[in-house]
Image (cartoon, rainbow, N blue to C red):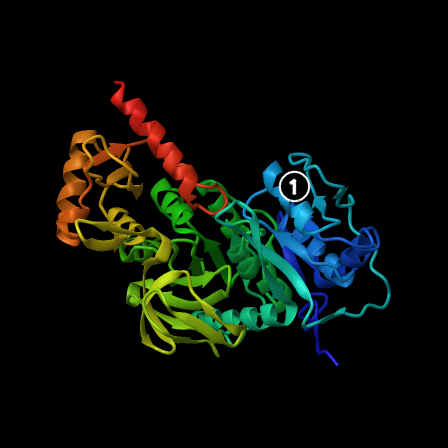
Amino acid sequence: MSRTTPLLWGGDLDAPLAWRHGEPLSRRQYLADVQALAARLPERGAMLNLTGDRYLFAVGLGAAMVRGQCSLLPPNFTPDMVERLSALFPGTYALTDHDGIAPALTTLRHADGRAPIPARQTVPEIDESAIAVQVLTSGSTGAPVPHPKAWGYLRLGVEAEARRLAEQMGLQSFVGVTLVATVPAQHMYGFESSVLLSLLAGATVDTERPFYPADIAAALARAPRPRMLVTTPFHLKSLLESGVDLPAIDLTLCATAPLSPQLAARAEAGLAAPLMEIYGSTETGQVATRRTVQGAEWTTFDGVHLTGDGDASVAQGGHVPQPTTLADVLEVMRPTSFRLLGRSNDLINIAGKRSSLGHLNYHLNGIEGVLDGAFWLPHEAPDGVVRLVAFVVAPDVSADEIHKRVIAEMRLRVDPAFLPRRVVQVPELPRVQGTGKLPTSAFAAWAEQVLAKASRR
């Protein structure tokens, strides 16, 4: 017989699961809303959860599981992706709380208002082997590649994360911690570190996804303590550079790109709290953390161990049931610790020397005056010699000065083969708003347009 796991941490059903504009939404209310929505869902199918409100996203997730359905977390919601999802998962339907997205699918809207709370409630039990979500990546052909996540293993991973974070905060458990997240619930990092931490570890999540620095500061200020900011290097850097007054918090959690020690130190000073980075992948989910100011070494979660090395590093154990090759290049120090050297797909070779774009971007973003920056390697060059280009956002520094500064600073940090041929000052990089990532193909197309426009001047 399969084992089951509760849908919800049930220590106190009257405790808040979420805060919306300072008002609590209880776990008891959540269960009522889940059951009400579950009764309205199609009998079969898979849910494309487009909900922006984080509490309502969690309601959709729970309702789908109660009906024995999975939720789909694709990399984007383009018409092409939606069409491919429909072919891959027959009966796919959408759930939304706004009018901004109208996919070519049967679409349900969340009900206005809250469901009545019955006199007696029980927490639904979910089969641990049930596929709760299908996380999808774009394959080399553009077809989405599904990565099924069983409910039981999601729970194990989130419980390991909660123990690690609570320990860093000096707490006995994660119960009662308030989460403010700048990343969307549909992204694996945001899904695990906001939605699942609130459902399964007793935390409380702010329903909004603040983007602008003033909105982030306001959300943190109204969040009861202990409170944690769940964010990305891009959002964090913008927040610290904004000059807005920042309330003290108890922990900052960061992911999606390596963070420089300089920015981590500024964040710890500005927010009066330790900062931890979390490392994971679509294939494994989150598997390790580090406190960035204390060094480059990562420590795996309880039960997870590593074998292999370099671009053949394999994770297994704990919430990673099968040996899984990681898409990054690691220097494995011990079975439970490693250094991250870069993505296996962003390794570059110039003049017989190897580096990674992630490593170069790490150093570029540590240069004074650079608010954001990224390297790009063209596929070809007019003279046949391909050289790196550095794009930088540095509004307070002249183009000539930032060029000199980047070359001088990078010369101290990397091999001369990886010095950029050009340093191009731009107003902003084409980052995805929710995660701060730079998708490879979109960044390359943008870079070619910027350079072509510059050459015509």
**Front residue (pair 153, 351):** 351
The answer to whether any part of residue 21 appears in the image is yes
Dot 1: element: helix
* Figure check: 373 above or below 14: above
Give percent across and percent down for residue 428: 36, 34
Q: Residue furthest right?
A: 119
Q: Position of residue 454 (x, y in %)?
A: 27, 24
Residue 201 makes an appearance in the image: no
The quarter of the picture where residue 61 lies is: bottom right
Question: What percent of the width, then of the height, locates residue 300?
Answer: 42, 73
Q: Residue at x 60, y 70 (%)?
A: 155
Q: Is residue 349 left or right of residue 35?
A: left
Res 297 → quadrant: bottom left
Residue in the picture at 38% in, 61% down: 328
Q: Position of residue 408 (x, y in %)?
A: 13, 44
According to the picture, the residue beneath numbered tag 1 turns out to be 83
Q: Amino acid at mark 1?
A: Glu
Tell which of 32 and 255 is nearer to you.
255
For this view, does 15 lie left or right of residue 366?
A: right
At horizontal 51% and vertical 46% (from top left) the residue drawn is: 141
Label 1 neighbourhood size at 10 Å, few (<14), some (14-19), many (20+)?
some
Quarter of the figure with the C terminus = top left
Question: Foreground residue, 21 or 401?
Answer: 401
Q: Compare residues 65 and 238 and report the one nearer the observer.
A: 65
Left or right: residue 78 versus residue 428 is right
Q: Is residue 5 above or below residue 110?
A: below
